[in-house]
Image: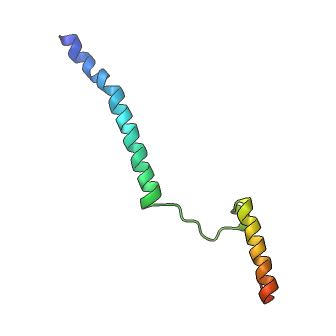
Amino acid sequence: MAAHRRDAPIDLLLPAAGAGLLLGILVGLVLGWQVWPVRWFDTDPADLRLEHQIDQVILAADSLATTGDA
């Protein structure tokens, strides 16, 4: 009976570690998406994806053609 009690903490280690991992991932996702999300500002066109770079060039060219001042 003494051996059974000694093994009890080892038997609980894997479920506790799994629960801690899931809780940590959940807390990290909530913090990253809701509490402190990434905010991009003053980015360069080179930081955009290719599709958005193309859109930015088209919009700048359209603005230049329309107003004469991009």
Quadrant hosting residue 11: top left
Q: Quadrant of the C terminus?
A: bottom right
Quadrant hosting residue 20: top left
Judging from the image, the colouring scheme is: rainbow
Q: Is residue 34 above or below residue 57?
A: above
Q: Residue 25 at what x, y percent from top left?
A: 43, 44
Q: Residue 66 at what x, y percent from top left?
A: 78, 86
Q: Residue at x 70, y 67 (%)?
A: 44
Q: Residue at x 77, y 89 (%)?
A: 67
Residue farthest toward the left in the current orientation of the protein: 1
Q: Quadrant of the N terminus?
A: top left
Q: Is residue 16 above or below residue 3?
A: below
Quadrant hosting residue 58: bottom right
In the displayed structure image, the side of residue 7 where residue 51 appears, left or right: right
In the displayed structure image, the side of residue 66 where residue 16 appears, left or right: left
Q: Residue at x 19, y 12 (%)?
A: 2
Q: Residue 28 at what x, y percent from top left?
A: 43, 49
Q: Count the marks: how many?
A: 0
Q: Residue 34 at what x, y percent from top left?
A: 43, 59
Q: Residue at x 49, y 60 (%)?
A: 37
Q: Is residue 30 above or below residue 23?
A: below
